[in-house]
Amino acid sequence: MSEQVFRLPDLGEGLTEAEVVRWLVAEGDIVEVDQPVVEVETAKSLVEVPSPYAGQVATRHAPEGGVLEVGKPLLTVAAVAPAPADTYREEERAGSGNVLIGYGTTGAAAASGRRRRPRTAVAHVTAAPSRRVPLVVSPLVRKLAREGGLDLRSLDGSGPGGLIVRSDVTRALAIPSTPPPASTPAPSPASAPSHVSASAPASASAPASASASAPASASASASAPGERRVPLSGFRKATSAALSRSRAEIPEATVWVDLDATRLWELREATRPGPGLLAYIARFTVAALREYPVFNSRVDTERQEIVELDRIDLGVAVQGSRGLVVPAVTDAGSLTTTGLDEQIRRITEAARTGTVTGNGTFTLNNYGSFNVDGSAAIINHPQAAILGFGRILDRPWVVDGQICVRKICQMSFVFDHRVADGATAAGFMRAVADAIENPASAIARL
């Protein structure tokens, strides 16, 4: 019985390892091509990995909670010999003569009772078409094809030995291939919107004290009395490296302002069940980025250049089941307020279940859901800035010389001092703040 070893495939975006969270098959099970066999956790997300082989599971090469490097054996699948009945049916369809006389053979063969060499010229004797198994190992490539409705059996791979790679699928789907980000996204200390956004679920999952996929027991032998050691999950390792890189490379500066969000709050209440508060804030942020494009950029340290980006992919910080992630609304500048609301809902829900991630060009976050007023957030490297909002509170405020109760919110802005100075940052902040304080006039200008 021949065996095929399925090795952990390259999961993309420069990832070199993954942690086995949950096996979906047991040794001895029969699997088909493209059947999900294991759920793994990378530094980016949870991924269901499908098998490129069909057969019987002979060996699972890693336990749940174990970490595998890309290219290491993941699963061994043994080919399953066809049952005698299946062999009979194949021979019958092919007209081989290896059947009872009078069944599935030509008249001449039946009459003579002798086994004859089949004539390929006989029109009605046709071999059953064989199913072409696509040569592809990456679950991301399979997922991209599945979501695009593309049959991988129709593709000829451009990779080594005819391997189907991501560019083959994107070319077939006529989608421009997007290169992976320069580095792992570095989320800021924020959470998904709650009271500032009616467009996202109101409650955020609190981060667990340890990754759900990490080994249950800490290494007690290395702990001093009164200590408990918890291994960093792959996700936490990547987050740690990204945050450290951001702080080490980016000379950041923070500015903040208190703003009166009463009119925006009233607009939201008057248009229910329309777009949520965060959708309006996102719309105003996109407009300000068009006015100050230097903040929708990154710094090319090798060439000492500021790279301004035409497309605005708006990242939204979300506290997911595994930790903080920043999925992005792609091309947010082309969307209406309603469109932004729909996309923010979608990526927020998906991020909380660990099924989507992304790396935007600018990050918007809401730390107000933790009932805090302000934060000096960490920039999501390689972005140039991050805009955050605290909780909205009823506070005394002077309007037309009179003290009255208004809904006040603190807005903070952290930016890369290499791309702009304080005056430019203040201009950007006031563009967003003025739109929030006078939303009707701002919307009319958009």
Image (cartoon, rainbow, N blue to C red):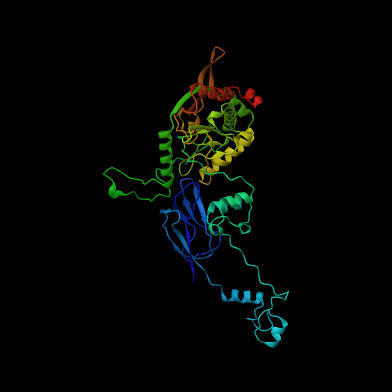
Q: Please give the count of numbered marks on the rendered protein.
A: 0
Quarter of the figure with the C terminus? top right
- Percent across and percent down for residue 145 are 60, 52
Identity of the residue drawn at 50% across and 21% down: 423
Identity of the residue drawn at 44% across and 45% down: 235
Picture quadrant of residue 375: top left
360, above or below 218, in the image: above
Identity of the residue drawn at 33% across and 45% down: 229
Identity of the residue drawn at 66% across and 72% down: 127
**Residue in front for this viewpoint, 340 or 272:** 340
425, above or below 192, in the image: above
- Percent across and percent down for residue 94 are 66, 75
**Residue in front for this viewpoint, 443 or 174:** 174
- Percent across and percent down for residue 366 are 50, 32
- Percent across and percent down for residue 221 are 28, 50
**Residue in front for this viewpoint, 123 or 265:** 123
Toward the left, the furthest residue is 225
